[in-house]
Image (tube, rainbow, N blue to C red):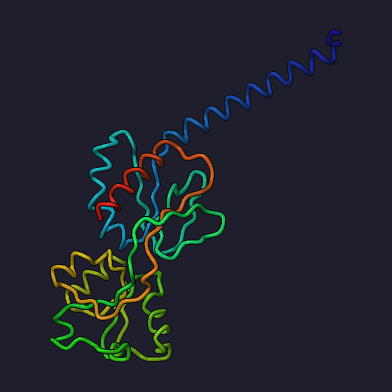
């Protein structure tokens, strides 16, 4: 058997097409390999836990460029976008791989100077204080609702970025809802007091897309798991 003239013309056209496809795939693969590792998390987690530890990852892997994308909005990992999201909650996000990183309850905090030696004894006492809330979240509202205070009017409410929320709480500007892991050092140093604690079953989770992971992501996941064990 041998090709006809039309068959040879078609074979040359197909060979050219497959060569272009192969070149395109190779270019995309190389581009993805060189793309910075993108880690999504909340501003509070970034400033309180991730950034103080990130230097050790950079020392271990000096060839890996990174982007830390702090946002209070849940962002799904996606091709060419976020490689891993660090989310607070109980897990179970549909269509994504989820692995518990650190257990951490939710705490209502305030500075000793705010409470003036008399810490609130029940949730209703907190409506007499100013509240600080991280921009883009509803954690304080959700906490008040959970404790039967959905329609209660607090003294005032100020919305600020997560790291500024904690700065304000340390300075006695109001009460705030945070994860215990984010304020662990402040609680130990008594800069802040945890007056109530909830969600004992929750924590921070590593959230990734199913499928093959690129090398920089694998390296980051190995590193952050070790850091979580130390915590």
Quadrant where the image shows the N terminus: top right
Q: How many marks?
A: 0
* Looking at the image, residue 83 lies above or below residue 152: above
From the viewer's perspective, tell me whether residue 10 is left or right of residue 30.
Answer: right
What residue is shown at x 83% (from left), y 11% (from top)? 3
Q: Quadrant of residue 123?
A: bottom left
Quadrant where the image shows the C terminus: bottom left
What residue is shown at x 22% (from left), y 73% (from top)? 168
Q: Position of residue 53 (x, y in %)?
A: 24, 50
Give whichever of 210, 132 is nearer the camera. Answer: 210
Q: Where is residue 109 in the image (x, y as percent from the top left)?
A: 25, 76
From the viewer's perspective, tell me whether residue 182 is left or right of residue 139.
Answer: left
Q: Position of residue 198 (x, y in %)?
A: 35, 76
The furthest residue to the top: 2
* Looking at the image, residue 54 lies above or below residue 62: below
What residue is shown at x 13% (from left), y 68% (from top)? 189
* Looking at the image, residue 186 lies above or below residue 63: below
What residue is shown at x 28% (from left), y 35% (from top)? 62
Give whichever of 133, 150 is nearer the camera. Answer: 150
Q: Position of residue 113 (x, y in %)?
A: 14, 81
From the viewer's perspective, tell me whether residue 231 is left or right of residue 201.
Answer: left
């Amino acid at each position: 058997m041998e090709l006809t003239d039309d068959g040879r013309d078609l074979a040359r056209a197909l060979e050219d097409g497959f060569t272009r496809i192969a070149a395109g795939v190779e270019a995309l693969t190389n581009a993805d390999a060189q793309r910075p590792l993108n880690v999504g998390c909340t501003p509070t987690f970034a400033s309180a836990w991730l950034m103080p530890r990130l230097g050790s990852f950079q020392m271990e892997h000096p060839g890996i460029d990174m982007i830390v994308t702090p946002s209070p909005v849940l962002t799904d990992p996606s091709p060419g976008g976020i490689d891993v999201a660090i989310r607070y909650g109980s897990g179970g996000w549909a269509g994504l791989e989820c692995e518990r990183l650190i257990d951490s309850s939710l705490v209502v905090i305030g500075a000793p100077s705010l409470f003036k030696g008399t810490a609130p004894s029940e949730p209703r006492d907190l409506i007499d204080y100013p509240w600080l809330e991280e921009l883009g979240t509803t954690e304080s509202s959700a906490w008040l609702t959970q404790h039967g205070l959905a329609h209660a009017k607090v003294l005032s409410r100020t919305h600020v970025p997560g790291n500024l929320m904690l700065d304000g709480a340390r300075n006695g500007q109001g009460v705030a809802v945070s994860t215990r892991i984010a304020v662990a050092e402040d609680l130990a140093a008594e800069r802040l007091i945890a007056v109530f604690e909830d969600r004992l079953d929750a924590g921070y989770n590593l959230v990734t897309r199913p499928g093959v992971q690129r090398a920089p992501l694998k390296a980051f996941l190995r590193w952050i798991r070790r850091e979580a064990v130390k915590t």
